[in-house]
Image (tube, helix red, strand yellow):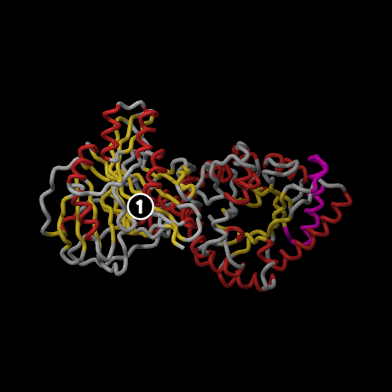
Amino acid sequence: MKTSIATVSLSGSLTEKLHACAAAGFDGVELFEPDLIANDHSPEEIRALSSRLGLSLDLYQPLRDIEGVDEELFTENLRRAAATFATAKRLGIDLVLVCSNVATATVDSDEVSADQLRRLGDLAARYDIKVAFEALAWGRYIDDYRRAWRVAALADHPNVGVCLDSFHVLSRGHDPSAIEDIPADKIFFLQLADAPALSMDVLSWSRHHRLFPGEGAFDLPGFLSHVLATGYQGPLSLEVFNDTFRQTDPDRTAVHALRSLLWLQDRTAALAPEGWRRDLATLTETKPPTGFDFVEIKAEDTSEVEVALQQLGFTPGGRHRTKPVSLWSAGDARVVLNEQQARDQIPHVAAVGLQVPDAVATSRRAAELMAPVAYRRTYASEQTLGAAVAPDGTEMYWVSDSAWVDEFENGLPAAATPVCGIDHVNLAQPWQTFDDAVLFFTSVFGLSADTPAEVPGPNGLVRSQSMRTADDAVRLLLNVAPHILGEASMPQHVAFSCSDVVGLARAARANGAQLLAVPDNYYDYLSGRFGLDDATVNTYRELNLLYDRDAGGDFVHFYTRTVGTVFFEFVQRRGRYDGYGADNAPVRLAAQRGAGVGTVRT
């Protein structure tokens, strides 16, 4: 289906927005009036530019506070509307959005509103323009799409129909199934937005916190299914008011936005009868990852990480036969240390490898979703890995088998270890890529997002989002550091599962490993909160172990010191414990800050 996006969803000038939308691959845009009036190009020039870029101008908006008023004010409103229609005509746009009245309405009457929309339709017809009436979720009298349609039907004018906006429907908890009662030729336009589940006034929620499809809590595939069931053939258009997107690079945001529409069409097609599916974009079908294959740490000098891994019981698996890259393993966990093209770089998580059922299919899907390709020189004798760059710059790789391990030479035999594998990977996110990252991992790899959390730290709240496969074989944590003066270093970490975390901590300390020091106050609290016996608490205190419990089981873990921007965590899940020890995160953040990690640089 035709794709479109409201210019209000992007940052920059109107001309910059149009270029970004065209470059991303959108078919059209809905033009936000403030973008035009703040631009120094005439409507005719904007029309010509859009034509050269291959973009249709699908909608001009918004025309506000028109209906539900007394006759004196309505006369003035018709004058305003005429000016708007004249501008739309100059732009070559034949559809104008009319919002339900939020400010000046004084008459709560379907008949009065319908009569005024009928007369507005008469005026619009003189300009060969149609008006799409939209119920705003905070409309003074009309805040429900069903009432908006009832009023438009009463108006009974060929130039008057409705605009459906997923935010205005779903934010109020309205049942979208009644959309199917609206004739397709009376649904003049469709606007789509996702949003997080928040408890706040709906106007602020709408103006600051909308998201692209796939990033929030709304059932947009279900919503779109109801619209398409009517036979609607118009554009699928994104209207996303979001403070982050209006501050970030419009080219990047436009690609992000189109990716969300491709995901939404694919998800909706899975629900749809064959009659709709021919009009929806579909993606290559893939299955989620079955586990982690490796984590890569990159630096100009990785020797300090090598020492830490050896102290923690990892075995050197050899050196790559053509590259300055080494492999370390413990159980099923593999850590790659990469010194290639890493001048002046300190240790950091550079890449994550995933095991997938069909690497070729995953590569096709990533390409269809416009995921940037991660490039690395590969020789004929080496395994080619599927590769993409996540929004934060982390390179993601995927394989169906791990033949690449055979490219490492002169490794030692694997030693016995309580380490089992990689439990989860924590990737610190720049504030401007967080929502994009959620969509990336959802759409490309089929991970699901848990409810976001906020963790208190010494510099403010850390926003945290858990992403996982249904069977928990792959868990990713996306963390955003708080906004504070200067630039704080937000470390990343790799968590390894193990069968005996106490024994591992003892052995690591005996080998000289430096574990993150935990304050004594924590253990006094631990004893009181969980009722642990003194011997257990003393063991945890001695080894700097942390503890948590939920309804399914308990969790014991420890952290290493940070090297560069990377530290390791070792965890033991007992029973069916499902979390990450979130209540212990403030203790960890404070301890790291005391050790000089994540402090403010001015």
Classify residue 10 as left or right of residue 373: right
Question: Magenta stretch: residue 387 in it?
Answer: no
Q: Quadrant of residue 153?
A: top right
Pointer 1 local density, CA inside 10 Å: few below 14, some 14–19, many at least 20: some
Please identify the residue farthest to the right as the structure is shown: 72
Q: Quadrant of residue 389?
A: bottom left
Which segment did they paint magenta?
Answer: 104-129
Image height check: is 128 above or below 492?
Answer: below
Question: Magenta stretch: residue 121 in it?
Answer: yes
Q: Residue at x 30, y 26 (%)?
A: 533
Mark 1: secondary structure: loop
Residue 379 or 119: which is nearer the viewer?
Answer: 379
Please identify the residue farthest to the front as the structure is shown: 520
Residue 152 or 593: which is nearer the viewer?
Answer: 593
Q: Residue at x 39, y 42 (%)?
A: 587
Amino acid found under the numbered disc labelled 1: Ala
Q: Residue at x 45, y 52 (%)?
A: 481
Classify residue 488 as left or right of residue 565: right
x then y, percent, for residue 468 = 37, 43
x then y, percent, for residue 599 = 42, 56
Residue 419 or 88: which is nearer the viewer?
Answer: 419
x then y, percent, for residue 494 = 31, 49
Residue 240 or 546: which is nearer the viewer?
Answer: 546
x then y, percent, for residue 410 = 10, 58
Secondary structure predominantly adopted by residues drawn in magenta? helix
The residue that mark 1 highlights is 595
Q: Residue at x 51, y 57 (%)?
A: 257
